[in-house]
Amino acid sequence: MLITAHFIDGEWNLHKRVLNFCVIASHKGNSIGKLLETCLRHWDLKKILAITINNASFHTKAIDYLKSKMGHWKNGSPVLEGKYTHVRCCAHIANLIVQDGLKKLEKSILSIRNAVRYVRSSPQRLEEFKTFVLKERIECKWLMVLDIPTRWNSTYMMLDAALRFEKVFVRMGEDDNAPSSFWFGEDELDREDGVGCI
């Protein structure tokens, strides 16, 4: 777990500092709350407005645990009675929403991912791909991107690249001896257009 502090100094300059980087032995709320408490007390931080953390239920328990303990610290209590102590991470919420939307395109995304993986798995196929890129006169600074399924933005980049190289994938699918399961058809690309709406 990484704990960072963001604060404003007397001249209204925003600062960010890494306070601690520690291994979590247990993902139970009280265990995480105790780790947070230990870190905050070590740094003698008493005036805490907000803690940004994702919205898993054990994190809610961790914040509840921490708020209950902060009242007992010398000169310490949650700012504004702890009303804003737990701020849910917007990036985590956006990721959950997009991941849910991507489930509707799962079959198409898997086909495209397999095609990208197939081309990237061999230096010869990658060179062949580059040759087709030149023949099709596709201008792009980068080639294919293989996504990390848990990171929606990498899936978006993979799909965006697949659209740019659609003609190349079609040509490779026609010329290559690969099993058809490695290539996607036009219906995958048509369904992929829906990703822009998510």
Image: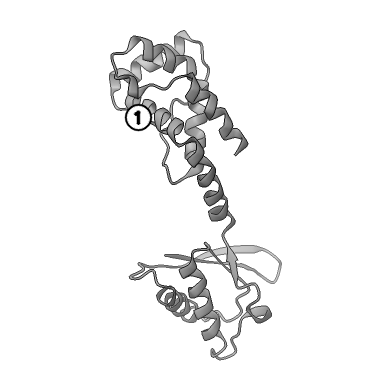
Q: Residue at x 38, y 27 (%)?
A: 116
Q: In the rendered view, does 79 fall on the left or right side of 166?
A: right
Q: Is residue 137 visible?
A: yes
Residue closest to the eye, 77 or 102:
102
Residue closest to the eye, 5 or 187:
187
* Quadrant of the drawing holding the C terminus: top right
Q: Is residue 141 visible?
A: no
Residue 111 rendering spot, x and y as whole percentages:
40, 28
Asked which quadrant contains residue 13, the reply is bottom right
Q: Residue at x 47, y 37 (%)?
A: 155
Asked which quadrant contains residue 45, the reply is bottom right
Residue wearing tag 1: 117
- In the image, residue 60 sits, relative to residue 138, either above or below, namely below
Q: In the rendered view, does 65 fall on the left or right side of 14?
A: left
Residue closest to the eye, 144 or 40:
144
* Quadrant of the drawing holding the N terminus: bottom left
Residue 182 rendering spot, x and y as whole percentages:
34, 24
